[in-house]
Structures are given as C-alpha cells and as structure tokens.
Image: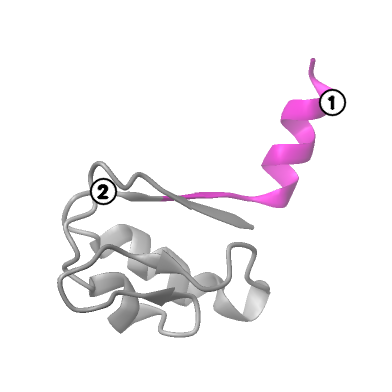
C-alpha cells in the first residue's frame, strides 16, 4: 500500500492523525505529513479510516496489487 496526499486540498483538520497516528502527523496550523508512505498490512484498517474520514478528501491509497497490475497491463 502506498499513500499520497493532495496538499492543495489538505486543511490540517488532523482527522488522519487521530485515525492512524503511526502513519500521519499534522502540526498545529499545518498540513498533513506522511510519516510512513508505505505502511504495512497492520496499518491497513487505520489508513482506510483516515482516508474515509478526511473532511477534504486529500488522502488516497494505492494497493501494491493494483499498482503492479496497472504496470503489467501497459
């Protein structure tokens, strides 16, 4: 799994940090910082919640299987 953020959308609400503190950090008056851009499977549910509950939709995830399949389809 690989995580990315659209900083044009991030408003620093810190919902992601609340859901997955091992993966995301949001400093006061700042935008999200991805602490672990490729977290392991043990973080999958927490990351999914962080993405789902992000008020601005700034976060996204690419699964390794999807990524490899897309490469192979070219």
Q: Quadrant of residue 15?
A: bottom left
Q: Are marks 1 and 2 in contact (CB under 8 Å)?
A: no
Q: Which mark is residue 57?
A: 2
Q: Is residue 55 left or right of residue 19?
A: left
Instruction: Find residue 14 and report its image quarter.
Output: bottom left
**Sequence-wise first label, 1 or 2:** 2
Above or below: residue 29 compared with residue 21: above
Please identify, in this view, whether the residue under mark 1 or under mark 2 is nearer the observer.
2
Q: Which residues are magenta?
A: 60-74
Q: Is residue 5 magenta?
A: no
Give neighbour class at mark 2: few <14, some 14-19, many 20+ (Cα, 10 Å). Answer: some
| Residue shown at 27% from the left, 62% from the top | 31
The spot of residue 18 in percent (x, y) is: 29, 83
Secondary structure state at the residue bearing disc 2 = loop
Dot 1 falls on a residue whose secondary structure is helix
Q: Residue drawn 68% across and 40% down?
A: 66
Kindly report the secondary structure that dominates the magenta region of the rendered protein: helix
Identify the residue at horizontal 15%, vertical 71% (top origin): 29
- Residue 8 in the image, given as x and y percentages of width and height: 25, 41
Residue found at the very far right of the displayed protein: 72
Q: Residue drawn at (68%, 73%), measured in percent from left and top?
A: 40
Q: Is residue 62 left or right of residue 59?
A: right
Query: What residue does disc 1 label?
Result: 72
Cα gap from disc 1 to disc 2, whole angstroms: 28 Å
Q: Dividing the picture into quarters, in which one does residue 36 lie?
A: bottom right
Determine crowd level at label 1: few under 14, some 14-19, many 20+ residues with C-alpha closer than 10 A. few
């Amino acid at each position: 799994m690989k995580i990315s953020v659209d900083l044009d959308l991030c408003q620093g609400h810190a919902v992601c940090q609340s859901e997955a503190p091992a993966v995301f950090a949001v400093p006061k008056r700042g935008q999200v910082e991805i602490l672990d851009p490729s977290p392991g499977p043990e973080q999958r549910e927490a990351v999914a919640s962080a993405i789902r509950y992000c008020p601005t939709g700034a976060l996204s995830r690419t699964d390794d299987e999807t990524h490899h399949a897309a490469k192979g389809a070219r």
